[in-house]
Image (cartoon, rainbow, N blue to C red):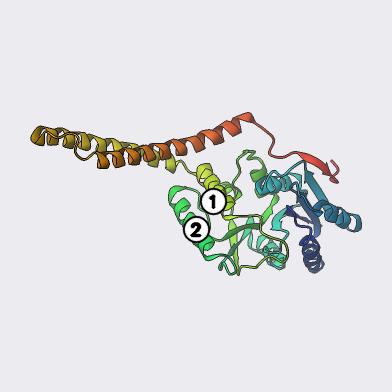
Amino acid sequence: MEKISVIVSCYNEEAALPLFYEEMDKVTKIMKEVNFELLFVNDGSKDKTLEVIKDLAKKDKRVKYVSFSRNFGKEAAMYAGLENSSGDYVTLMDADLQDPPSLLPEMFRLIKEEGYDSVGTRRVTRKGEPVIRSFFARMFYKIINKMSKVEMVDGARDYRLMTRQVVDSIVSMREYNRYSKGIFSFVGFKTKWLEFENVERVAGETKWSFWKLFKYAIEGIVAFTTAPLTLAAILGLVMCFVAFLAIIFVFVRTLMFGDPVDGWPSTICIILFVGGVQLLCMGIMGEYLAKNYLESKNRPIYIVRETNIKN
């Protein structure tokens, strides 16, 4: 029988895990034509997440786990799951049930019967999400799709079912600074999108603050487009042109009126504005240099403290 590996990234999810396992168990009983591997990745949780996973592993031999030495982030957890999975098909899910396990049978059918390599999911609504957060999320997708050659689907979740060929392609990309939504699009393959309405968490609190989402958005932009560098160069050229015109204006005005001191407040404003543009451009270049610096260190994406997976 073919096997599906279900990868679940966990960070302080002790309250949600029993509920997730219960829902997932219902799905596995429906899909009797395949075997399942439930692979939980404990991303340095500070609560009893690991203990809950170990209890599940004791009563269900399908449950496997990888526990990190510290918190490496969701991207590292997803990569660890993909790298350690053994299924013919692999899916990524969140433990909070915002990724409905009930969609899995249809996802599997689309791959088997309609020949898709990957079936992704996307939210058609953002019910329950703060209005400002939803607004910035939509703006982010509009901006990055205009700048990047890789298409990012608005509302796309990390929840998707993939063939082993797709998974191997993703695992081969061992970049330290990861943005999986972009990587999924970059590797290509024939993908079908399933739409569903937003589902709120069943337990616990979200780990994604507005600031963390903002930093994650910057990660995506830096990882999949160099457009900001081009923008910085254009801003530099524009400011040089403006400065040249200003010099001519001051020179002619001084010759005509002989009062070079008048207008110093506007001069200060211009200096501050130009300085701000320079710092912005330096910041953009700094982001790219920082990513290059981190990649050059060749550090591991994650470090395993313990696991029940046997080589």
Whether the residues at callouts 2 and 1 have beta carbons within 8 Å, the answer is yes
As drawn, 44 above or below 60: above
Q: Residue, x 77% and y 50% (percent of image)?
A: 46
Regarding mark 2 in the picture, which secondary structure is present there?
helix
Residue kind at label 2, given as amino acid type:
Phe
Q: Which is more toward the observer, 277 or 264?
A: 264
Residue 152, given in percent of the width and then of the height, sits at 52, 54
Residue neighbourhood size for the residue with mark 1, other residues' Cα within 10 Å, grouped as few (<14), some (14–19), many (≥20): some
Position of the C terminus, as image quadrant, is top right
The answer, for residue 61, to whether it is visible in the render is: no
**Mark 2 vs 1, N-terminal side:** 2
Identify residue for label 2: 136
As drawn, 82 above or below 292: below
Q: Residue, x 13% and y 33% (percent of image)?
A: 254
Identify residue for label 1: 214
Residue 106, given in percent of the width and then of the height, sits at 68, 67
Residue neighbourhood size for the residue with mark 2, other residues' Cα within 10 Å, grouped as few (<14), some (14–19), many (≥20): some
Residue kind at label 1, given as amino acid type:
Phe
Residue 36, given in percent of the width and then of the height, sits at 80, 58
Report how far apart the C-alphas of labels 2 and 1 lie in the structure. Answer: 9 Å
Q: Residue, x 56% and y 61% (percent of image)?
A: 155
Q: Which is more toward the observer, 289 or 225?
A: 289
